[in-house]
């Protein structure tokens, strides 16, 4: 009989009792939201994954954008001439 380790409880999950998601096998009771205090039961239709952990839609971590101030595009934009209704100004944008 085939088995894998459940990522939630680290015990063996056998093929007859598995819930297969995110390339892992889970016990049905272990297939829950990873958020502290939530532990909502998930289904194959409503689970979400972030950093290998299962989440419900309410507790899915938000993706945050990271701006890189040293990139060439950002540096070029900082020193690009300002444009207004009359045309280009002679001054450039002050560095931050």
Image (cartoon, helix red, strand yellow):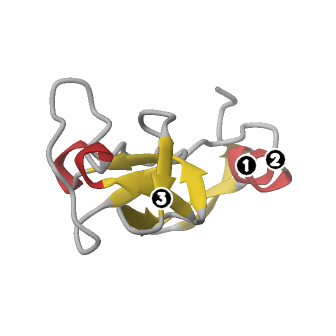
**Residue labelled with disc 1:** 74
Q: Is residue 48 left or right of residue 51?
A: left
- Looking at the rendered image, the quarter that the C terminus falls into is top right
**Residue labelled with disc 2:** 71
Residue drawn at 57 percent across, 57 percent down? 3
Instruction: Return the residue found at the far front.
Output: 1
Distance CA(mark 1)–CA(mark 3): 53 Å
Q: Give the x, y percent position of residue 74.
A: 73, 49
Q: Give the x, y percent position of residue 83.
A: 56, 62
Secondary structure of residue under mark 3: strand
Sequence-wise first label, 1 or 3: 3
Along the line of sight, which residue is nearer the eye, 2 or 8? 2
Residue drawn at 85 percent across, 52 percent down? 72
Q: Residues within 10 Å of mark 3 (few under 14, many from 20)?
A: some
Q: Give the x, y percent position of residue 62.
A: 37, 45
**Residue labelled with disc 3:** 14
Q: Are marks 1 and 2 in contact (CB under 8 Å)?
A: yes
**Up-down relation of residue 55 to residue 83 (above or below):** above
Q: Residues within 10 Å of mark 2 (few under 14, many from 20)?
A: few
Query: Which circle, 1 or 3, is nearer the viewer?
Result: 3
Q: Give the x, y percent position of residue 84.
A: 49, 63
Distance CA(mark 3)–CA(mark 2): 50 Å
User: Residue 30 occupies which quadrant of the picture?
Assistant: top left
């Amino acid at each position: 009989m085939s088995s894998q380790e459940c990522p939630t409880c680290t015990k063996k999950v056998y093929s007859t009792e598995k819930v297969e998601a995110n390339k892992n096998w889970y016990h049905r009771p272990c297939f829950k939201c990873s958020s502290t205090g939530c532990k909502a039961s998930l289904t194959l239709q409503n689970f979400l994954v972030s950093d290998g952990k299962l989440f419900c839609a309410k507790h899915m971590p938000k993706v945050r954008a990271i701006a890189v101030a040293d990139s060439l595009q950002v540096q070029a934009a900082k020193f690009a001439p300002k444009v207004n209704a009359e045309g280009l100004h002679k001054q450039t944008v002050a560095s931050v």
